[in-house]
Image: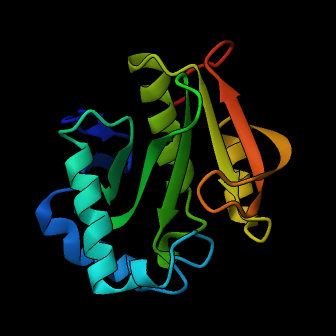
Amino acid sequence: MIFSQHLETERLILRPFIEQDFEHYYKFMSDNEATRYMNYSPLETTKEGARALFDTVLNAYTEDSSDLTLVIAQKMNNQFIGFCGLKKTNTSDTQEIYFTLLPKYWGKGYATEATTELINYTFNQTSIKHIIGYASPDNPLSWGVAERVGMKYEGYANDSGSGKRRKLFSLFREGYQSKS
């Protein structure tokens, strides 16, 4: 997805990754607590594996890709605190939303703030009509974010990326009211 702008909230900036973000990204990927609920392979958490994923993210900004990954940074100091994004699914008008933060930023409302802004962007600026999200059954903080942004719990489903059984949440453009 070609995306060159910044999205802003009261406390956050959501922006494309740039080359200078790699060290922050690698620090995140090598943090076992940060990636505890994610579907990364052991190889992807090495410097070489993180580099390959990072390059894929950078290339998606200029290629005809429907995937989008954005840095979540604190507005006051541009501090990297995590990332969020959208990725394609098997249905052209549906995208999977995701977010992840460094553990020291958990429970402070940043994930809800970033996810709300990304949903507003998606429903107001793209043709996407349906957003889904998966959450680990062991991660109640993520369930709370999904519910606070208006997503509906749909039951358990196999995650499209890992095949693991996850909680599935969804949200449709129709009837959605933009939140700030």
Q: Is residue 47 left or right of residue 127?
A: left
Q: Give the quarter of the figure containing the N terminus.
A: top left
Residue beneath the point at 56% across and 38% down: 89
**Image position, residue 77 (x, y; %):** 22, 63
The residue most toward the right is: 155
Q: Is residue 138 left or right of residue 122?
A: right
Nearest the eye: 33 or 56? 56
- Would you place residue 100 above or below residue 145 in this image? below
Residue beneath the point at 45% across and 85% down: 31
Nearest the eye: 25 or 161? 161
**Image position, residue 99 (x, y; %):** 51, 55
Residue beneath the point at 78% across and 71% down: 138
Residue beneath the point at 63% across and 62% down: 162
**Image position, residue 20 (x, y; %):** 12, 67
- Image quadrant in which you'd find residue 93: top right
Nearest the eye: 77 or 57? 57
- Would you place residue 157 above or below residue 41 in this image? above
Q: Is residue 179 left or right of residue 5?
A: right
The residue most toward the top is: 174
**Image position, residue 147 (x, y; %):** 73, 43
The residue most toward the left is: 20
Nearest the eye: 50 or 175? 50
Q: Is residue 146 left or right of residue 1?
A: right
Residue 79 shows in this picture: no
